[in-house]
Image (spheres, rainbow, N blue to C red):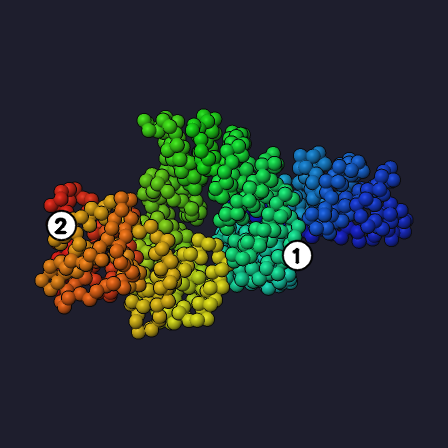
Amino acid sequence: YKRTPSVSVSCVVADVVTGCMNEMFQPNRDHVLEQLGICSGEDQVLEVVGKNKAKLTVNHVGCAIGMLWHFQKEKPQMLRTVEFIKSHPEFLTLRVLAENKIELMDDVMLVDMLYNVLRLNVEPYDSLAQQLVSEAWLRLYRFPMPSLSKFAVCLSDQHLQHSPPMGQITDILNQKLSSIDDARILTTLMVSVSSLVSPHLRDKLINKADHLLDTMDPSHYNNPRRMVQFLRNIKYSYRPLLEKCNHILLRNVPHLNAENISIIMGLYQSIQFNNCDFRLAAKQRLMELVDSSADPFSFTKLFVALGPMAGEDTKERLESTALLLAEDFNAHQALAVAETLEEIQCRNLNLIQKIASVVHKNLHVYKPMEIARITQALILLHYQSPELFTKLRNILVQFLLNSVYPYEVTMLTRVLSMLPSPRLDEGVVSRVEAVLPQCNLNDLNTFAMAVAKWVRNDPSYRHSTPSKYVRLLQTLNRCGHERLRKADRLDLVLEELKYMSGEWFEEMLLEETMVTLQRLEDQISWTNVPEMALFLTRTNHLCTPLMDRIASVAMENINKIHYSATYATLLPFAVLNYDPPGVDELFDICIQRSFDPHLLVLLAYALAVADCFPEDLVREIFNVNFLAKLDSQLETLPDALNKRIRLRLMELNRAVCLECPESQVPWFHERYCLQLQKKGNGSISPVQQQIHQMLGEVLGGINCARVALLTTYFYTVDFECVLDRHHQAVAYSEQSQLQISEDGKVRWGSDSVGKDRSEVPPGAQRVAVDFLDFKSFCKNSRHMKGEAMMRKRHLEILGYHVVQIPHFEWNSMELSTQDAWKEYLRKKIFTGLP
């Protein structure tokens, strides 16, 4: 829901002034049209209307209303006077005359009239708008394509995307698609009918759009922008078309304003499309616009687009400007700024306070989803105002009780659960329960997480779970299982599973989900392989039949799978440590493709986890020019992704240094790792404290085992001990001994990243003892994951005899006594020693 733009798609309005003037040169001169033709502003048009009320024909009315909108659209947003026109008595005259003359309008004028009055903020429920829509519906099949596309925009503006006329427009588009050669008309129709297209029509539209991109004027950037919006609307990241659209948009960046860039980046974000070159070009263009964006409208667009990828100095400058403009922001500008402040993790309390004050004054303006968004932003900004949050909670509850839309009830419920509340209203429970059968899997998961929060916060939870929550959870479970059992389209299931996570899903639905996916296994194709692979990776669920199918389909169709989806396709094989037949060949083919810098790092790390180090790939990444380009790209990426890429680069650097010394890649992450070490909490779990105590007894003293030791290359070993040639433990010196505080914090007397690693006696052996919790294993088995295997390889290269203690062994019924634990450690440590 976050920062997804609501893009108003519009066709270019006909030049009404020229149309009016053409009428003037008929044999019988029309003095009214002559007067309209020389008007240079809205006031003059309305004055002409007032003086000639009795003479106005249908052409006069159409021309006057068209001119009113023509003058408005030529002005910047902040200078428009739509409300002045709408309340003017002569505009009311035009509306009455238009409604009385609808049957006299030709097809083009009819649609233009509807389009123009909606742009002049005439409400959809106004009788004029309704009569125009009804008449247009009757004439639908005879409209020329430009008028059809404009009428589709009008229906979308009135939230009639699922109406019968829109269904008929979809049918006409399907029938006449081959005859459309105007990219503007096609893309406008694509966006308008996006909620009604079938997979077959979707593919036809994409092919047609792809063809028209090659023939259109590349300066018309709104056409590719609308294609991206269409893909966003249908939740289909078709990479070849995205890349082609991005190429055209990239060429136009120097001419784009902040609003256009903000819209495009919002679309890219919502379909998870990160293009390095576009982000760098957009950032440069936005930096150029900073000085000229001094009014609330243009600054808001700039702040939304530039804020998340700006450096610290630029962020401070933007925040200072926002503080100066805060009192001039309208309700929706304040909402946009608040969401961006949350995204950039702003801690400017004065600015947050000012924006919250604007929001507080405008609560009556916001719609349900906007109230949910503003509440979420203020919560995540840690804003403190019991009065405001009480008002927001009451508004959320009221909106929720009145809503009939499942997506709206879901969002309102999720945000409501973020607010502190001693008890939940029965009305809210009833409303949630009523919409559950209509919800998709992702919505059901959202409700489950909300219910879990309510249960924990309910004072009576300490004694028993209240029946209202039990009833809700039972309904959730039933609806979830029914939806999975009735599912017959894999693409829809994968779309609903895209963001699924949490305890309820894993405990109640994951097994049923895997059964459903295997039932629909034959529908796995090159188009959905990446999504399937990502789901298996995210859930850590090893399902060998599905993995084999993914590998087989990917091998057969590797040339069809877009390069940007290659990483996602390979990921589960590396992470889950599974090698299906032919996986090496699949890796080899994928390595030969081109990638954005950040994707190349992620791909190389995944291959390293799988013990695969292609020489060319290593050489390309650890190159000064590549690393400089990567640094530039990372500055534009969201903070979480930036940190993830930097961590993966460090881990890849470590893996190459340890496993490919012949590549002579230097270790350049010492300072980075020291910074990470300072930020870490350095604590050990109760289980690790228990193992340490047992090791002391097994090895002959607590000073024979060190805790949380940092090795060279910054691996943290849970426990280290040194055994001499007779397999006797060697005690550490007093200076190297640990101190464990009551909260489990580890402090050493003098420890520093393996620098105090004294030489071991001749013939002695360092032993690393690692406790492996559930994160080291696949969810549904005791199969060890790839990263745990890589860690073991690396510690062995560093000279350790590695002992791994799986959690399911240490916590088993067999090891329920002190003696059993000690015997287990003895066998683990001393078995296999040279």
> Marks 1 and 2: which is nearer the front?
2
The residue at the point 31 percent across, 51 percent down is: 682
Indicate the position of residue 41 as horizontal and vertical percent values.
80, 48
Indicate the position of residue 800 as horizontal and vertical percent values.
21, 62
The residue at the point 65 percent across, 44 percent down is: 328
SS at mark 2 in the image: helix
Q: Is residue 733 left or right of residue 158?
A: left
The amino acid at mark 2 is Glu
Count residues near mark 2 (Cα–Cα under 10 Å), then give few for <14, some for 14-19, many for 20+.
few
CA–CA distance in space, label 1 to label 2: 72 Å
Residue most toward the right? 28
SS at mark 1 in the image: loop
Q: Nearer the viewer, residue 370 or 747?
A: 747
Q: Is residue 122 visible?
A: yes
Q: Is residue 512 visible?
A: no
Q: Are marks 1 and 2 in contact (CB under 8 Å)?
A: no
Indicate the position of residue 766 as horizontal and vertical percent values.
19, 62
* Vertical arrangement, residue 387 with respect to residue 522, above or below: above
Q: Is residue 545 left or right of residue 64?
A: left
Indicate the position of residue 411 as horizontal and vertical percent values.
49, 38
Q: Is residue 525 left or right of residue 337?
A: left
Residue at image mark 2: 697
Residue 46, quarter of the rendered image: top right
* Vertical arrangement, residue 239 with respect to residue 406, above or below: below
Residue at image mark 1: 292
Q: How many labels were placed on the picture?
A: 2
The amino acid at mark 1 is Ser
Residue 391, quarter of the rendered image: top right
Count residues near mark 1 (Cα–Cα under 10 Å), then give few for <14, some for 14-19, many for 20+.
few
Which numbered dot is residue 130? Answer: none
Residue most toward the left? 726
